[in-house]
Amino acid sequence: MATNDSIETEIDMISSRLAVAERLKEYKATLEALLQKTRSALEEYPARKHAELQKRWQEQDRNLKDLLAKLQCSIPDWENRLCHAVAPLFAEIAGLKCELRPTPAAPEPPAGTSEGLYARRERLLLRLAKRQARYEQARLALAAWEKPAPTLEKILNDNDKLVADIKKSIGQPEAPALLYDMFFKLLPMYYLIAPAAAASTRIDAKDFVTRHAGEEAWDDLTEMLGPQPMLIEPAAYLKHLAGAPLKDFNQASTELAETAGDLQKIQDEIKRAEKALEERRKTLEKAARAALLDAPAAPTKQVHQAA
């Protein structure tokens, strides 16, 4: 005969299968929408367009090396200014972020062997916040590749404008403020979109940021700037997209859905336990009286009198 426990186990198993099926359905819809977007993206990103954008990046690469040297020479204490004026601001941002949510790389809280339902819920809420952050990163990284040509063109245009503005201001009173534009806007965007072949020759913007603003500054800066497409060959576009961007998004989506499901189960268990507790408290007096009346009497001890 089936017990309540076995029926509940069967329901849980079916619910898990339905949840997996629903995730597969959503993932299939995501892939179909992405495929349509990639077809449009490739039409806007032929080999001719890639060659044009890469040529512009290479020109910026040459110009930036010269501009960087001139700016550093015009502000001899540029390193000191960055370390004392900008680094504390990034440290403050890092502290504020930690107050709000755990970073995606933070370890998950361990499960206790005898923890109660409330403790399990708190642990799952922390895990959910962590996986939500990871999912958002993966979603933005995937979305960055939906329109590579116009995105890359805009970045190159913005960089050209920053280069022109910095050149005009070298030697002027406002020049020190442009250190931020150079090191935390211009160089990072130039670095993020760089073609893979330029890895050994490009200016290492990440190294500049971490040396002068702290280890966490680069992660925070790239989070603010958002994921960007690289100058990749059109022929390699789909292969790259189907690699880390799509796999990371799929894994993050699955983990987020699983954690949300686990949290819902705990919420349901908490409701059942709270309801059972409330009902037991309401019937406590009546049940206690009935139990006392039904309880078997303890055997009386015989008292032996001395002879």
Image: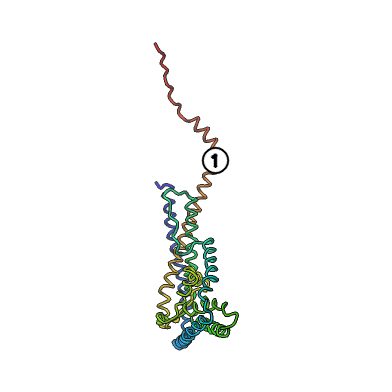
Q: Secondary structure at mark 1?
A: helix
| 121 to 97, vertically: above or below | above
The residue that appears at 46% across and 81% down in the rendered structure is 39
Instruction: Determine the residue located farthest toward the right in the rendered image.
Output: 173
The residue that appears at 43% across and 76% down in the rendered structure is 241
Where does the image place residue 230, in percent across and percent down from the top left?
45, 79
The residue that appears at 40% across and 80% down in the rendered structure is 200
The residue that appears at 57% across and 83% down in the rendered structure is 171
| 81 to 112, vertically: above or below | below
Where does the image place residue 83, in percent across and percent down from the top left?
51, 71
Instruction: Determine the residue located farthest toward the front in the rendered image.
Output: 76
Viewer-proximal residue, 161 or 265? 161
Residue 36 visible from this viewpoint: no
Q: Which residue is mark 1?
A: 281
Where does the image place residue 59, in percent across and percent down from the top left?
47, 87
Instruction: Determine the residue located farthest toward the top in the rendered image.
Output: 307
The way the protein has been coloured in the rendering is rainbow
Q: Mark 1 belongs to which amino acid?
A: Arg
Viewer-proximal residue, 213 or 22? 213
Quadrant that contains the C terminus: top left
Q: Rate crowding at label 1 as few (under 14), some (14 to 19) or many (20 or more) other CA atoms within 10 Å.
A: few
Viewer-proximal residue, 190 or 88? 88
Residue 258 visible from this viewpoint: yes
| 130 to 179, vertically: above or below | above
Number of marks in the image? 1
| Picture quadrant where residue 86 is located | bottom right
Where does the image place residue 191, in percent across and percent down from the top left?
46, 78
Viewer-proximal residue, 153 or 4? 153
